[in-house]
Amino acid sequence: MAVSSLGAISEYHELLFAWASRTIRARYQQSVLGGLWAVLQPAATVAIFTIIFTQFIPIDTGVPYVIFAYTAMVPWTFFAASISDMGDSLIINMNLVSKIYFPRQILPIAALLARLMDFCIAGSILVLLMIYYQVPFFALGWLFIPFILITQMVLALGIGLTAAALNVFYRDVKHLIGLGLQLWLYATPIVYPIDVVPERFLPFYFLNPMVGIIEAYRAIVLRAELPGPYIFISVGIATVVFIFGYWFFKRVESQFADLV
Amino acid sequence: MAPAILFNQVSKCYRVGRGLASLFAIFGKQDYSETDKFHWAVNDVSFEVQPGEALAIIGPNGAGKTTTLKLLSRVTQPTSGQIQVNGRFSALIELGAGFHPELTGRENVYLNGIILGMKRSEIRARFDQIVDFAGIEQYLDTPVKRYSSGMYARLGFAIAAHVDPDVLLVDEVLAVGDYAFRMKCYNRMDELRAKGTSLLFVSHNMEDVRRVCDRGIVLYGGRKVFEGIAAEAVAEYANALRDNASSSRKSRKVGENLLAQKVMTHAARIERVEMIGADGIPIRTVRSGETVHVEVEVQFFEDAEAPVFASAFYGPNGEVVYDTTTRLLGVSTPNFRAGDRAVIRYELTMNLIDGLYRLTTDLAYNDLSCYYDYVADALSFVVVASDPAKGIANLQTDVSFEMIESQAVREPI
């Protein structure tokens, strides 16, 4: 069943990309700054934390705090925004879901792809920051970036598919996602370095799959190192979450149209 | 040939009354309590549609028409029964479903086309046709949120009608267009059917149903209560409206497909339709019981061998009051030559109760295979009666009264 519905995705790939591009164009239609918002979102968050952690509570991050935080904030913003969008993707398109048939997973997957665009725009600013702060470029490591990115997307998809499906039944999910993502930001070394986490917390800490993913980005981009074996914890958890999410989504998919 | 649509003993049940489903219900486990109520939106309905055929689904609100279309388009799953659709379909359950208001007409053509199952290359090939059909050339690069509702609907129909579907599902969408656009839609549907597209048509407009469809089924309370040729189905629906107990009505056998492939050739044109009163001038108001003339003037562009003239009168609720043809009346019509111009004159006694009536007239080939021309609502007129009765016909009643035996107490003299 999973195989046949993945087959349907390839049959419907035009719809997937058309819907993703519709989402992107619609997002920045009639806005002055357009795609710049993709940068402003993480940049503003980084700015406020830079003030806090360099002026109020100085913290040692090795590299300048701006690039330290931005390196993690860009993938985190992608992660959080894509989950939030995926969660809403079915209910905001209910008029379509209840009127026209197509594989329903198209909507959350397109929401994810649409946020990937933002990630690329925000990521290009990271390159400028690296040049400005003269961070050495680790070519071999960068070959692993797509692999980490895919792990992150698989994890987001697993959560997003589950959230999108549950959201159709219980609108509480929408609020739960917002709250969960807010807490999750602080449970992940994004605004602070992992060194400040007490040793005894670490075994549990790494069960948060985003810890390994964010650490892997930082290792490659800022420290010119390959990610440690912790990345496999993230890959494993992401795979399990994805398989569950996909299975759950397909299991309840047929009821979506009846629940408008 | 395999039918384009096979709908076999299909039922769809909704649970009503309770707000949130439990987690067990989400997983499709039986989780029904005694207090749950069920609503059978579609109950044991069967029908087939052959390639190139047009089937109307008519019935009052809540009869299960839209649910039937949703089942066919796989949007929702049947509770029981089998559904088979052969080929690609295009569903017009709502015009422009999937339009994004912020995007331009051009962008939405591609998006909507892809949603309806076209390839980008196919849309590109038909783009000009679609835009031309919708008549929105100059607004192509305007966001559709600035479109009028008519433009929105025209673009929606134009896209769906150019998918080149094997099955086209049309749900109550022609109501929004103006007369000219509806005519265009009719012609497009005729074109598609000539290519073998099957049509499933849901409408409350009985004239549309008669114009577009060969056969019709009447749904009532989720059940099929009638199946037959479109005109019969329309008449049956009018009856069903009056007869709330019609759920016990038995399905009748499918009638012979008389209206199949009736397409307009435009080899002649109905130029003028008028109702003439006793004093020889055109009128729109008739006294009940008055004798009037209806004149239909026809211009022939090609030779026509003994064509059949038909007129149908519709009552205030869309019911057929009187539907006849020169053939049914036993009148033989002459052969006409290209360039001829003729008037056919009916003399009618308007024994109708008061209300607004409409006249539809057409001119058909001798073998009834095609129309030369067809004018829906060619004329509307008002009948006024001095005695406001109910029903359809004025049976010209005279009332007299006779006492057989009286129990009245005689006043003592």
Image (spheres, coloured by chain):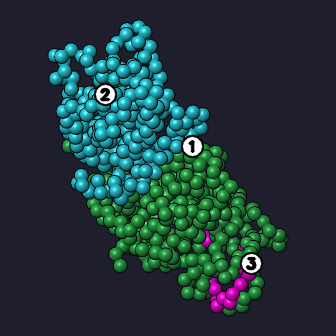
Chain colours: A cyan, B green
Q: Distance of mark 3 from mark 2, alpha carbons?
A: 91 Å
* Left-right relation of A84 to A26: left
Rendered image quadrant of residue B23? top left
Spot occupied by residue A40 in the image (x, y as percentages of width and height):
49, 28
> Magenta span covers which residues?
B293-317
Q: Amino acid at mark 1?
A: Glu
Q: Secondary structure at mark 2?
A: helix
Spot occupied by residue A125 in the image (x, y as percentages of width and height):
46, 32
Q: Secondary structure at mark 3?
A: strand
Residue B124 in view of the camera: yes
Residue that label 3 marks: B297
Residue that label 1 marks: B102
User: Circle 3 marks a residue in which chain?
Assistant: B
Residue that label 2 marks: A223
Q: Amino acid at mark 3?
A: Glu
Q: Distance of mark 1 from mark 2, alpha carbons?
A: 44 Å
- Who comes first in sequence, dot 3 or dot 1? 1
